[in-house]
Image (cartoon, helix red, strand yellow):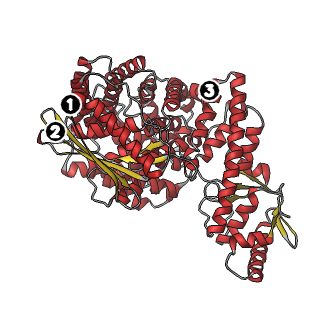
């Protein structure tokens, strides 16, 4: 429920999950100055109507001072708050000589709304509210020393326990009703609180990153075999329920980093690192692996393994099991050892698979993905029953469509779908394959089928950040930004050095009107080496159009490295390249009608002349400039895996983007591409009311 509606329904509204915020009846935030004043309100809003002794409040917020001085500070803080809040809500406080409380009828909180929705029996709103709070901790960013932290830890544990029981009851109710969709949706939403509950000392989950192994082998110049082995170790270790493994994308992004190991561990949000090296002499393998404490950077354990390529599967399992045992010993925890994985019994097929996976992960580079496809197809020619390789081949085809200027995007998408379907047929547990199959459903104007597959993929692989991000992105595409955000944040929590994740986060925050957060996410994406268009759009929305033009203009420096010219065209260079990007930057970001008209005219020319008239280079700026007819002519003609991400930018309530949504032909377009069907099943967009409520 939007903040304005909440506030109108219940006087003031308190946000207790994450940073505390108080919202007035008009939906605007009430800025409370003073750290202790905000903390006092947060404490009292946890249980409106329940009084707390003044001395206890003083112990929590003014610990270390004289009792009389602390009580005087509390009294002064209350007087200031009364003066600020009384004109908005009279009798907000209920105060006596010894106790203080807030009036239960004067404030409503996100916690109270969630518990109420869960207690009402089967209620879809409970899932939405739970998704909205995601993994944010109760009363985050409050720090007043050890005594306060102990009090807060107890309150958090009590709340989480209440929520757990309420969710279990609600899940049971959905099961009794036979509503599998809402049952799965509520379970997914509850899983997203795992990052917060894992932070508890009582939770045995350990966050670990496997760094790319180094290759000490002249024949493996680019480290394909070593990278493939560490990549597979990530998957094998991920089978242990007590281990949460950092995403592959982030691990690869820091492979050449010279930063100290504790800084790397901090960047990856992990407590331990696994690093190693691989050396081959003919068929002989020598693998060295070490376990590193993330806080100190010191080795906790290291070991060398010898084997041969005939026993590479056993070697990999030995390493994974030993790492798990050493983690258990070092942390004095019970850790379930990973079991054997379904791969292939054929050594040659497996080596080709490792090399193909390594190239797919690199993605960018002349001929890299074509070679990856060749290697993976060669592996499957040896062992056509190798399910994980079919999934890897599907991923290579997706990356080819998205990251290379190819003209046969639909054919490659169809081939990707065939590979994903084959992987699922051989191994129904291939969740990631389902997510990629969902991409192809978008090209068929079937977002309902795409979301069905993405939800099933997340059910099968909730700890796979690629799967979480895919579900979040699909929800973004249909305008369900509030529901999408927790999945995107969960993916970033596990894969925090992967730039594409921050593109999704920047757009989500922009859609929600959180401009500072959108700019910050866009800047993080740029810091990780990706294009700056999203940063520029967010900066322009914040009002600094001159800076936005410059940020967009900087994107030209990534031409032919991270971004490529449209398929079938020759790369621009020199003055022509600079002129094109200057026109583009001004058209999207300057806010001047003359610049917008010039770039729209250029888009008309590109649409008429490019081999692919639905190329991303046309679709994305058309949305950012509110060029409705071009949006309908491109996405309304053909959605591809390359341009589908542009859909997420439709849902920012800013000028001129909103002009697409407000165009009289928008609903016909939405019906044509399947969005209306998706809204009818999965809920209407944050910015559109359902027909029966208009």
Q: Position of residue 56 (x, y in %)?
A: 76, 69
Residue 94: tell me if it is visible: yes
Given contact means CB atoms under 8 Å apart, are the residues at marks 2 and 1 in contact? yes
In front here: 474 or 295?
295
Hey, which quadrant is residue 485 in on the image? top right
Identify the image quadrant of the N terminus: top right
What whole-number distance in Å separates the C-alpha atoms at marks 2 and 1? 9 Å
Given contact means CB atoms under 8 Å apart, are the residues at marks 1 and 3 in contact? no
> Is residue 370 placed above or below 51 in the rendered structure?
above
Hey, which quadrant is residue 444 in on the image? top left
Q: Position of residue 100 (x, y in %)?
A: 82, 67
Given contact means CB atoms under 8 Å apart, are the residues at marks 3 and 2 in contact? no
What whole-number distance in Å separates the C-alpha atoms at marks 3 and 2? 50 Å
Question: The residue tagged with tag 3: helix, strand or loop?
Answer: helix
In front here: 273 or 547?
273
Q: Position of residue 590 (x, y in %)?
A: 42, 55
Density class for disc 2 (Cα within 10 Å; few <14, some 14-19, many ≥20) is many
| Residue ID for mark 3 | 181
Going from N to C along the chain, the mark reached first, 1 or 3, is 3
> Is residue 590 placed above or below 164 in the rendered structure?
below
| Residue ID for mark 2 | 280
What whole-number distance in Å separates the C-alpha atoms at marks 1 and 3? 46 Å
Going from N to C along the chain, the mark reached first, 3 or 2, is 3
Q: Position of residue 493 (x, y in %)?
A: 47, 48
In front here: 57 or 377?
57
| Circle number at residue 309 | 1
């Amino acid at each position: 429920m939007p903040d304005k509606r909440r506030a109108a329904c219940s006087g003031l509204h308190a946000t207790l999950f994450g940073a505390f915020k108080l919202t007035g009846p008009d939906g605007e935030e009430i800025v409370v100055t003073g750290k202790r004043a905000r903390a006092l309100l947060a404490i009292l809003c946890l249980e409106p109507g329940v009084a707390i002794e003044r001395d206890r409040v003083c112990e929590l917020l003014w610990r270390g001072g004289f009792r009389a001085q602390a009580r005087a500070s509390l009294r002064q803080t209350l007087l200031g708050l009364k003066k600020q809040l009384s004109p908005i809500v009279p009798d907000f406080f209920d105060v006596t000589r010894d106790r203080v409380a807030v009036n239960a009828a004067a404030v409503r909180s996100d916690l109270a709304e969630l518990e109420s929705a869960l207690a009402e029996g089967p209620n879809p709103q409970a899932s939405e509210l739970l998704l909205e709070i995601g993994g944010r901790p109760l009363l985050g960013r409050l720090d007043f020393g050890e005594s306060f932290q102990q009090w807060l830890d107890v309150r958090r544990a009590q709340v989480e326990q209440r929520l757990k029981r309420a969710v279990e009851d609600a899940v049971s109710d959905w099961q009794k009703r036979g509503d599998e969709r809402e049952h799965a949706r509520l379970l997914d939403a509850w899983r997203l609180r795992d990052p917060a509950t894992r932070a508890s000392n009582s939770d045995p989950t350990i966050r670990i990153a496997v760094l790319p192994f180094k290759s000490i082998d002249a024949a493996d110049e680019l480290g394909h075999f070593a990278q493939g082995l560490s990549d597979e170790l990530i998957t094998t270790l991920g089978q242990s329920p007590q281990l949460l493994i950092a995403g592959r994308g982030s691990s690869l992004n820091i492979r050449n980093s010279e930063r100290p190991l504790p800084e790397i561990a901090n960047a990856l949000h992990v407590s331990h690192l696994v690093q190693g090296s691989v050396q081959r002499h003919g068929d002989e393998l020598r693998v060295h692996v070490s376990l590193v404490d993330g806080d100190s950077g010191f080795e906790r354990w290291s070991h060398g393994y010898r084997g041969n390529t005939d026993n590479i599967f056993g070697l990999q399992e030995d390493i994974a099991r030993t790492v798990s045992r050493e983690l258990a010993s070092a942390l004095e925890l019970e850790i379930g050892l990973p079991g054997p994985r379904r791969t292939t019994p054929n050594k040659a097929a497996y080596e080709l698979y490792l090399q193909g996976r390594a190239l797919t992960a690199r993605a960018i580079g002349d001929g890299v993905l074509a070679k990856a496809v060749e290697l993976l197809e060669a592996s499957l020619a040896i062992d056509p029953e190798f399910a994980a390789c079919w999934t890897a081949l599907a991923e290579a085809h997706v990356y080819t469509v998205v990251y290379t200027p190819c003209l046969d995007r639909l054919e490659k998408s169809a081939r990707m779908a065939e590979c994903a379907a084959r992987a699922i047929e051989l191994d129904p547990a291939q969740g990631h394959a389902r997510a990629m199959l969902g991409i192809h459903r978008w090209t068929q104007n079937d977002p309902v089928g795409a979301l069905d597959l993405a939800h099933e993929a997340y059910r099968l692989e909730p700890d796979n950040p690629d799967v979480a991000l895919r579900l979040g992105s699909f929800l973004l595409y249909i305008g369900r930004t509030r529901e999408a955000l927790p999945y995107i944040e969960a993916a970033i929590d596990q894969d925090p050095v992967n730039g594409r994740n921050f593109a999704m986060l920047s757009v989500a925050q922009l859609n929600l009107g959180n401009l500072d957060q959108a700019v910050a996410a866009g800047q993080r994406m740029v810091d990780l080496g990706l294009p700056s268009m999203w940063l520029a759009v967010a900066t322009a929305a914040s009002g600094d159009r001159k800076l936005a033009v410059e940020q967009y203009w900087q994107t030209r420096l990534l031409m032919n490295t991270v971004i490529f010219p449209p398929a079938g065209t020759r790369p621009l260079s020199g003055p022509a390249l600079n002129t094109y990007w200057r026109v583009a930057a001004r058209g999207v970001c300057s806010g001047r009608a003359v610049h917008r008209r010039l770039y729209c005219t250029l888009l008309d020319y590109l649409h008429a002349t490019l081999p692919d008239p639905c190329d991303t280079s046309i679709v994305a700026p058309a949305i950012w400039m509110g060029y409705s007819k071009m949006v309908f002519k491109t996405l309304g003609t053909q959605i591809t895996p390359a341009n589908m991400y542009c859909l997420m930018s439709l849902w920012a309530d800013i000028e001129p983007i909103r002009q697409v949504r407000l165009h009289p032909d928008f609903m016909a377009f939405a019906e044509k591409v399947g969005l209306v069907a998706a809204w009818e099943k999965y809920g209407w967009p944050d910015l559109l009311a359902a027909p029966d409520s208009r």
